[in-house]
């Protein structure tokens, strides 16, 4: 017997077992509610159904005692796919008339978009869309950092997401753990979103300023195009707040090994993935850090030898291994693109002098020679005049926001 056939049988058995298990364990919830936010039909009585894990439209229909065969009819309707591609956790609202007949099924795809399936003569008829307008209010706030940006931001009324966004904006130039101190101030102009007068969350940050104790003003301004699409965040001079990377960390290079999912390791003598690029070069060749960032680790590893890890913004990390010696920068220090952080060597598992260089995005290894770097170009020419206007208006608004008095920081020295 071919092993492939045995494998397929095994998978099918497992699938069946899994199906039985999920039928036994899978739960769904039904809730009756009075809908105040949606303009639902007053004459109908609604029951909410939460799609369970491995749920489906036919399962939902069956759970709610509606004909399972409807799912085929619904699939053929315009926008029927929306009802077919349900995800666990989605909510369906079943609307019944006073006689208990199902008249409609509502599927709120988001807070501003609702699909309504109309049922008449005991058959699905059509699907309509209710698109709600999102109102955006511009809010200004500010504060003095007392213990952390997070707690002070909360006190100033910012949502968790907005605080994350604020930290993200400046993550290439401010070390939020070491550089921010009690007494530093922040100012934010941002949007809050409302539907039918109800707050649904924070929108974009339009402008922000963080002033650190060394007297530096870090500013950010959002540039949008005429259609309202985000172009990017820039400082008052139009420099991109995201910083670019150098493609190669050494000047003179001879690439000896590229990024490969699998290769035969010359020292370990076994197949192993190569998650970086090797640059061969004489011992002592300077290694330049490829982007602005912070040294998060500088030390020794059995395989990497002398190694340095540099964090860039929130997402990016670069790794430099097998160094003969380190540069002058220590763990926790901030380095600028091009700074010499060490010298080529052959410490750790290396057959000859080379730099092993890695590029990681959110912890995943990517090919440093192929990765698309974040766009770090300044304000595009065609937007320069518009951007100047934005800076003029937003900056004067920022200056009007009071950063709370220094009395806040009492007790912190
Ligand atoms: Zn390598």
Image (cartoon, grey):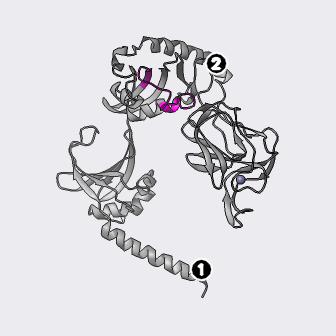
Q: Choose between 227 and 173: the one closer to the eye.
A: 173
Report helix, strand or loop for mark 1: helix
Report the Cα–Cα distance between label 2 and label 1. 62 Å
Q: Which residues are magenta?
A: 167-190
Relative height, residue 338 to residue 83 (above, below): above
**Which residue was labeled with disc 2?**
384
> Does residue 175 appear left or right of residue 264 in this picture?
left
Does 154 lie within the magenta span?
A: no
> Does residue 229 appear left or right of residue 289 in this picture?
left
> Does residue 191 appear left or right of residue 303 in this picture?
left
Does 188 lie within the magenta span?
A: yes
**Which residue was labeled with disc 1?**
4
Asked which quadrant contains residue 34, the reply is top left
Looking at marks 2 and 1 on the same chain, the residue that comes earlier in the sequence is marked by 1
- Taking the view exactly as shown, the residue that stands out farthest to the bottom is 1
Report helix, strand or loop for mark 2: helix
Residue 2 percent across, percent down from the top left: 61, 85
Q: Choose between 325 and 10: the one closer to the eye.
A: 325
Q: Choose between 49 and 249: the one closer to the eye.
A: 249
Residue plotted at (67% across, 42% down): 372
Q: Is mark 2 within 8 Å of ligand 1?
A: no
Residue 52 percent across, percent down from the top left: 34, 59
Quadrant containing the C terminus in the rendered view: top left
Residue 55 percent across, percent down from the top left: 37, 61
**Label 1 crowd (10 A; few <14 / some 14-19 / many >=20):** few
Main SS, magenta region, reads loop
């Amino acid at each position: 017997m071919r092993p492939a056939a045995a494998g397929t049988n095994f998978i099918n058995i497992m699938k069946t077992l899994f199906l039985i298990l999920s039928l036994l364990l899978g739960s769904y919830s039904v809730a009756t509610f009075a809908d105040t936010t949606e303009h639902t039909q007053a004459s109908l009585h609604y029951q909410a159904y939460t799609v369970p894990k491995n749920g489906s439209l036919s399962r939902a229909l069956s759970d709610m005692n509606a004909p399972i065969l409807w799912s085929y009819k619904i699939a053929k309707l315009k926008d029927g796919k929306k009802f077919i591609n349900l995800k666990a956790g989605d909510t369906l609202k079943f609307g019944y008339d006073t006689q208990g007949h199902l008249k409609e099924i509502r599927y709120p795809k988001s807070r501003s978009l609702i699909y309504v399936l109309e049922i008449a003569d005991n058959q699905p008829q059509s699907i309509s869309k209710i698109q709600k307008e999102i109102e955006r209010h511009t809010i200004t706030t500010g504060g003095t950092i007392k213990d952390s940006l997070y707690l002070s931001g909360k006190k100033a009324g910012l949502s968790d997401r907005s605080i994350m966004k604020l930290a993200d904006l400046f993550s290439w130039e401010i070390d939020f753990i070491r550089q921010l101190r009690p007494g530093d101030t922040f100012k934010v102009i941002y949007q809050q979103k409302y539907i039918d007068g109800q707050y649904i969350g924070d929108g974009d940050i339009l402008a922000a300023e963080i002033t650190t104790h060394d007297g530096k003003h870090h500013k950010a301004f959002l540039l949008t195009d005429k259609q309202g699409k985000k172009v990017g965040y820039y400082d008052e001079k139009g420099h991109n707040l995201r910083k670019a990377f150098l493609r190669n960390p050494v000047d003179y290079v001879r690439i000896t090994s590229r990024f490969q999912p699998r290769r035969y390791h010359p020292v370990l003598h076994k197949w192993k993935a190569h998650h970086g690029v090797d640059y061969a070069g004489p011992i002592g060749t300077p290694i330049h850090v490829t982007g602005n960032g912070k040294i998060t680790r500088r030390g020794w590893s059995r395989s990497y030898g002398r190694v340095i890890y540099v964090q860039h913004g929130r997402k990016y990390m670069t790794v430099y291994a097998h160094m003969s010696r380190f540069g002058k920068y220590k763990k926790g220090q901030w380095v600028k693109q091009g700074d010499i952080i060490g010298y080529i060597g052959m410490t750790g598992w290396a057959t000859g002098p080379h730099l092993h260089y890695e590029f990681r995005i959110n912890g995943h290894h990517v090919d440093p020679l192929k990765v698309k770097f974040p766009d770090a170009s300044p304000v595009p020419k065609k937007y320069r005049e518009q951007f100047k206007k934005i800076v003029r208006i937003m900056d004067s608004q920022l200056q009007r926001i009071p950063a709370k008095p220094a009395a806040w920081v009492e007790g912190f020295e």
